[in-house]
Image (tube, rainbow, N blue to C red):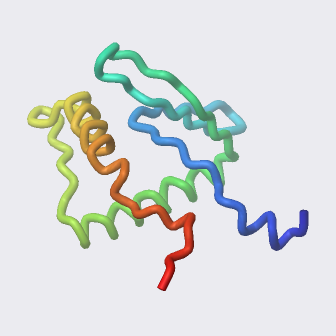
């Protein structure tokens, strides 16, 4: 497979509504998973490990993306006394289920 063909392959996307972050003397790691409100359990599925330099860059990039998001969509609530994080996860899962088939099927060409 050519380098150009490899670059055009779709990357696998995994939904995560739960994460844990840790570090040791040489690396940072972020574990991603999915919280299931029915069982109230988390199924971890992906671990990203990176150097401290790239961990810091990831944090700065994420902060910049959050600022951009808030400019477009308004502030993201963070008051944990008023915000039940698990309820937010449950709501996001409901929303995800309701929008699952929003995108049209583009696998077939249109006929004129």
> What residue is at 86 percent from the left and 69 percent from the top?
3
Q: Is residue 92 left or right of residue 32?
A: left
- Pick out the residue farthest to the left: 82
Residue 20 as seen in the image, left or right of residue 99: right
User: Number of marks in the image?
Assistant: 0
Q: Residue at x 68, y 33 (%)?
A: 25
Kindly give the residue lying farthest to the bottom in the view shown: 112
Q: Is residue 12 above or below residue 24?
A: below
Most foreground residue, 26 or 71? 71
Residue 48 placement (x, y as % from top left): 63, 40
Q: On the image, which quarter does residue 24 sit in?
A: top right
How far across and down, in percent of the image, does residue 11 sit?
65, 55
Nearest the camera: 106 or 97?
106
Residue at position x 43%, y 21% in the image: 42
**x then y, percent, for residue 88:** 22, 37
Q: Is residue 76 left or right of residue 39?
A: left
Q: Which residue shows up at 49% across the image and 62% down it? A: 61
In the displayed structure, 50 sits above or below 74; it is above
| Residue placed furthest toward the front | 112
Q: Which of the 4 image quadrants contains residue 30?
A: top right
Give the quarter of the figure containing the N terminus. Answer: bottom right
């Amino acid at each position: 497979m050519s380098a150009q063909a490899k670059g055009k392959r779709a990357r696998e996307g995994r939904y995560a509504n739960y994460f844990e972050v840790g570090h040791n003397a040489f690396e940072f790691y972020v574990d991603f998973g999915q919280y299931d409100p029915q069982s109230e359990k988390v199924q971890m599925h992906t671990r990203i490990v990176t150097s401290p330099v790239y961990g810091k860059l990831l944090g700065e990039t994420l902060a910049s993306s959050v600022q951009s998001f808030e400019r477009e969509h308004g502030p993201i609530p963070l008051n944990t006394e008023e915000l039940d994080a698990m309820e937010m996860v449950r709501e996001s899962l409901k929303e995800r289920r309701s929008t699952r088939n929003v995108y049209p099927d583009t696998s077939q060409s249109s006929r004129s």
